[in-house]
Image: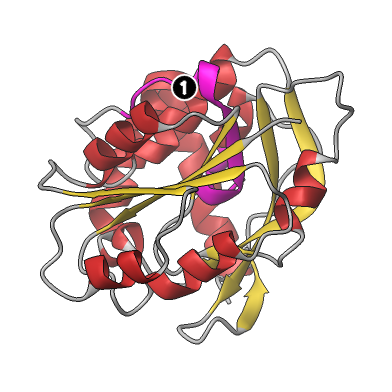
Amino acid sequence: MKSLSVITVTYNAERTLERTLKSVREQTYPHIEHIVVDGKSKDGTVALIRKYERDTLKWVSEPDNGLYDAMNKAAQRAEGDYLCFLNAGDAFFDAQTVEKMMRSFPESEFPDILYGETAIVDDEGKFLHMRRLKAPEALSWKSFRQGMLVCHQAFIVKRTLFEPYDLQYRFSSDFDWSIRMMKKATSIYNTHLTLINYLNEGMTTANRKASLKERYRIMAKYYGEASTFLHHIWFAVRAVTKPEK
């Protein structure tokens, strides 16, 4: 059976990390490893990791060069067939999520990318609403002309497909990386499942303006300046007619 490496990058995440550690530990699917790369936290993050320590949890706490550098480092340590990047505070939708996901495609198949839906939750882990951008029925690298239609955490990539995140992007390297992975993939599979409970905060949200500038640059690189400009006019209209809940 296919295995999954769940990657969590942390820094001073004592307040939110336990929900993620518990969610991974409680999954019914047996073939999961959890890799936590901590950036030398100064709070109780490491003590919390030690509390959940077990054979399938690998972790390190050392300085790094930011979120995406740590994610690259974690991917190098992974041994699973697939990679899932789950931030501190995020969780799988329920205890059977990974099992349902890994059994959603025939054993004889080995899709390059799996994807699904995302629920937004509050600080207590309570459901707020589904993510405003719904995952499309069929996904390709051109789909992200419309924005990041699939949440990074609900975008599961075969480990052999992985390429490092581009460290020139501080806030939206996941957007660039997702496009690159889709361009490289030969098979992208819609699980038709809600995979993730996504905490309604994070680095990208906190640095939204800088993140949007990076996304514009990334879109222009892949889709062209004219197309990107026209799509951003549409984004502005969409934001007015269908505002974020």
What stretch of residues is rendered in magenta? 146-165
Query: Residue 127, how many percent across, how many down?
Result: 64, 80
User: Mark 1 is on which residue type?
Assistant: Phe
Q: Is residue 153 magenta?
A: yes
| Residue found at the very far front of the displayed protein | 55
Q: Which residue is mark 1?
A: 162
Most foreground residue, 196 or 144:
196
Q: Specify the quadrant of the image occupied by residue 43.
A: bottom left
Q: In the rendered view, tell whether residue 163 sits above or below residue 25.
A: above
Which is nearer the eye, 88 or 99? 99
Residue 196 lies, in percent from the top left, at 62, 60
Question: The N terminus appears in which quarter of the rendering?
Answer: top right
15, above or below 69, in the image: below
At horizontal 49% and vertical 74% (from top left) the residue drawn is 19
Residue 199 location (% of width, % of height) = 48, 70
> In terms of image quadrants, where is residue 163?
top left
Question: Which quarter of the figure is the C terminus placed in?
Answer: bottom right
User: In front here: 239 or 186?
Assistant: 186
